[in-house]
Every structure is written in structure tokens, then in C-alpha cells.
Amino acid sequence: MAENKKLEAIATKNRLTRPIVERYVAGNGLLDAWRVTEKLNAAGIDVSLDLLGESVFDLAQSKAATQEYLGAIEEINTRAPGSTVSVKLSQLGIGIDLQQCANNLKSLLQMADAQGVQVEVDMEHSSVGRATLEIFKGILSDYPKTRLAIQANMRRTPEDLLSFTDIKPRIRLVKGAFDETLDDALRSADEVTEQYKYLSRWALRHLPDPAFGTHDDECIEVVKEAARELGLDRKSFEFQMLYGVRRKLQDELVRDGYRVRVYLPYGTQWYPYLMRRMAEKPANLLLFLRSLIGG
Ligand SMILES: Cc1cc2nc3c(=O)[nH]c(=O)nc-3n(C[C@H](O)[C@H](O)[C@H](O)COP(=O)(O)OP(=O)(O)OC[C@H]3O[C@@H](n4cnc5c(N)ncnc54)[C@H](O)[C@@H]3O)c2cc1C
């Protein structure tokens, strides 16, 4: 469904989908994102801004997305210091021209570095996974604080993590949101959760300032317990969650002294993002489909 253009056209025009969209998306523009950020910051929660949109079809679109991100980075210190931006390399042109994509990313990193802002790179479908990893490795020595999302479901992940020999990367560990083949990925939910727990313990032990992007109580407990056993300060890693998911749990973690960051999408191109969120919670998918037919 995430790739179905016909359904996308119907869904984006249909006002009845608004309540579900608004649960997961801050709004159409950066100003909407700042409005939501202000509330989250007041609750002790940081954000990572995500300009919605992926898989651009020409370099002009990738340039436009880069410009929008530059605008957001420029405003962070006045609007909400401590915010990061999360970028998808498909939006910066990875599917069109690797060099141009790397250049777009570098221009964001240069500006972010000058402003003291940090950038996170999302991990997308495996069709661009290798290239994402290579581009990330290419910028790491100049921008070692850049964070890369790493998917626990992917079979190559342990090998990929061990391939960082010189500079240990800052990662955001997630379960993985894309439909992958059994050859490439674990597909049983229990297996993915076990792998997530294993990699969480490993990341706390071996990597600087890891982030755990999950809403799963079991995984969160494992992170807390492993950090305790290793004698780590609660501020030496962070939990990340998606805007619209488990808000109460975010407050509880802040109250208990943990760092929490919410991934905050904004923009008009919400359809593929929302479909991935629906896939994670099938009950929501039914609600969404009902809203499309007005039932
Ligand atoms: C900050 C952040 C960044 C991410 N970045 C990436 C990325 O770069 N690449 C990538 O492939 N994936 C990314 N993801 C998505 C991730 O891979 C999972 O698909 C998603 O987080 C669901 O997995 P979970 O760990 O929450 O566990 P699950 O077992 O899926 O969920 C645990 C519980 O959380 C709640 N929950 C989970 N998802 C939803 C939802 N959509 N709506 C309502 N409740 C829900 C439910 O109560 C569920 O029982 C990101 C996730 C987060 C939190």
C-alpha cells in the first residue's frame, strides 16, 4: 500500500483521513513542526525533525529538499536548541546520483556543524541500504557525530556494525520498517525483538551515545537493565519514539531521568510514512481504510 500511487492520490485528497494523519504528522510546514516542538520541549522531550518525502525523481527535487533542511537547521538554535534533523538519502537523490546525494548530505552537515546541530540519517529499504551505509562511512571522519539508523531485522546488521573499525558510529537502533525478503531479513516478530535486545546490549557496551528507537516495553526494559549493569549514566544514551506513539511512556521515561527524543515528521508528502505506521499497528490500518470510504 505504501507504494500504491492510486491509493496515495485518493488518500491525500480525502479530508476524512485528517485525524489519523494529524496523529502521526505535525502539520504541513516547518511552523507546524515548531509549534509541536515547543510543547514537547516543555515536557522535557527533544525532537528530530523529519521533512516528509522520499524517493525523489530528479536532482531538482533533491536540491529543493536539501534547501528545506538547510532552512530548518538554520532555525534550530533560535527555535528549539537540542533538536536534530533526520534525513532520508532517497530524498537527497541516492536513487539518481550517488555523488550528488553525498554532496547534498555534506552541505547539510557543513551547515549543521557550523551551527552545532546534529544530523541523523534514516535507514530505508535494502535497495538503498548498501549505498546509504557507504555514503555514511564516507562522511564519518569529517562529521563523526552524525547518527545512522540501523535495522535489527536485517541479517547483515551485525557484520555492518563490526565493519566500523576506526570510528565507532553513533547509531539509532530500530527494528526495521520495510518489507524485506527472508534472504535479507528476519521476518518473525519474536526473532526481530530478540535480535533488537541482543544488539541493544552490544551497542551500550561498544558504541558512543546510542539511541534506541522503539516503543516496545520489552526492548526498553532490556536497555534500562543493561545500562544499569554496565553502570552507565541514564543520560549517556537516549530513547527515541515516533510522534503520535506512546506519549505517556515518553513522559514516564523523562520523569525517570532518561533522555527522550521524538521523531517529528512534517510536510505534505505523508502517505508512504503513514502507511508504514499503519503496517506497525494493523488496527490503525482498518481505521484508515474506513476513513477513506467514509465509514
Ligand atoms: C525514532 C524512530 C526512528 C525510526 N527510524 C527508522 C528508520 O530509519 N528506518 C526504519 O526502517 N525504521 C525506523 N523506525 C521504525 C522502526 O523500524 C519500527 O518499525 C517501529 O518503531 C515499530 O517497532 P517497535 O520497536 O516500536 O516495536 P513494535 O513491536 O512494532 O511495537 C511495540 C508497541 O509499540 C506500539 N506501536 C508501535 N508502532 C506503532 C504505531 N505505528 N502506531 C501505534 N502504536 C505503535 C504498539 O503499542 C506496539 O505494541 C523508527 C522508529 C523510531 C521510534
Image (tube, rainbow, N blue to C red):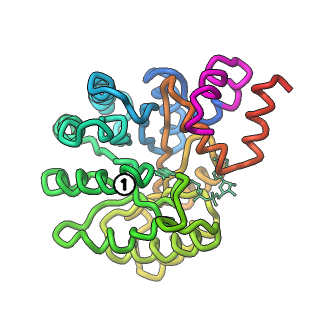
Residue displayed at 74% across by 21% down? 16
* Magenta stretch encompasses residue 137: no
- What x and y, as percent, mark residue 201? 45, 76
**Occupied quadrant, residue 79:** top left
In the picture, the quarter occupied by the N terminus is top right
**Occupied quadrant, residue 119:** top left
Q: Is residue 31 left or right of residue 292?
A: left
**Occupied quadrant, residue 292:** top right
Range of residues picked out in magenta: 1-20
Q: Amino acid at mark 1?
A: Gly
* SS state under label 1: helix
Q: Is residue 159 left or right of residue 262?
A: left
Q: Is residue 34 above or below residue 228?
A: above
- What x and y, as percent, mark residue 238? 44, 58
- What x and y, as percent, mark residue 194? 57, 75
Q: What is the residue that sits farthest to the bottom in this orientation?
A: 229
- What x and y, as percent, mark residue 45? 49, 45
Nearer to me, 135 or 48? 135
Instruction: Assign the magenta stretch its main secondary structure.
Output: helix
Q: Is residue 258 above or below residue 269?
A: below
Residue displayed at 54% across by 66% down? 182
* Magenta stretch encompasses residue 6: yes
Mark 1 lies on residue: 129
Nearer to me, 66 or 207? 66
Q: What is the residue that sits farthest to the right in this orientation?
A: 295
Residue displayed at 41% across by 79% down? 231
